[in-house]
Image (cartoon, grey):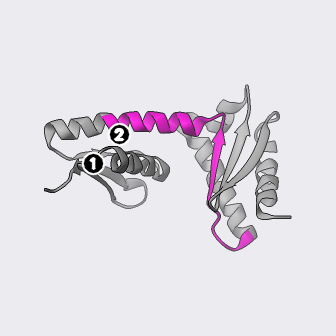
Amino acid sequence: MDKKDIIHQEADELLKKIISTYELSVDEDGGAFHVVIKADEEAPTVIGRHGETIRALQKILEVILYKKFAEPVDILVNVNDYREKQKERLEGIAESIAQRVKTDHHEAPLRSFSAYERKVIHEFIATHHPDLVSYSEGEGKERYLIIKPKAE
């Protein structure tokens, strides 16, 4: 059984404990594995409030797979295109903050974002606003992101 099949099997066993009706697929993209779940009525159960359950599910799968393969496995769990919608929302926030930073010429701290969310915002700023810089500070749950004008 290859890595993709094992990831599928482990994700399936975990999902069976949470919801009853779903479709599951695992795709590999440049060494990262995308665990794609399609669930109609039960999607909110898997996503959770503000994506808390989907992040927890991803973390649990990462731990299971680490034990299984004795190495970290880069996975991203997605339910009913939640990640795409989340990315659009985060890019909207990043654009709004970027415009405010440009207008006010002041840095803006952004708190309460997960590592994945900070990464999306960093990538958006780097790609769409070359006159701005973004970086993270702090540790653990206190980690936050700063967007500011690039030094001349």
Q: Relative to 26, is 42 above or below?
A: above
Residue 151 percent location from the top left of the image: 16, 56
Q: For the point 63% across and 68% down, which residue is it?
A: 72
**Mark-to-mark CA distance, 1 and 2:** 9 Å
For disc 1, the marked residue is 147
Q: For the point 65% across and 64% down, which residue is it?
A: 73
Q: Amino acid at mark 2?
A: Ala
Q: Residue furthest right?
A: 1
Q: For the point 78% across and 55% down, which residue is it?
A: 10
Q: How many marks?
A: 2
Residue 150 percent location from the top left of the image: 20, 53
Residue 24 percent location from the top left of the image: 77, 43
- The dot on residue 94 is 2
Q: Can residue 17 be seen by looking at this rendering?
A: no
Residues 58 and 49: in front is 58
Q: In which quadrant of the rendered view does residue 106 lie?
A: top left
| Dot 2: element | helix
Q: Amino acid at mark 1?
A: Ile
* Residue 6 belongs to magenta span: no
**Relative to 105, is 54 on the left or the right?**
right
Q: Can residue 116 be seen by looking at this rendering?
A: yes
Q: In which quadrant of the rendered view does residue 143 lie?
A: bottom left
Residue 122 percent location from the top left of the image: 38, 51
Q: Relative to 127, is 79 above or below?
A: above
Image quarter where the N terminus lies is bottom right
Residues shaded magenta: 69-95
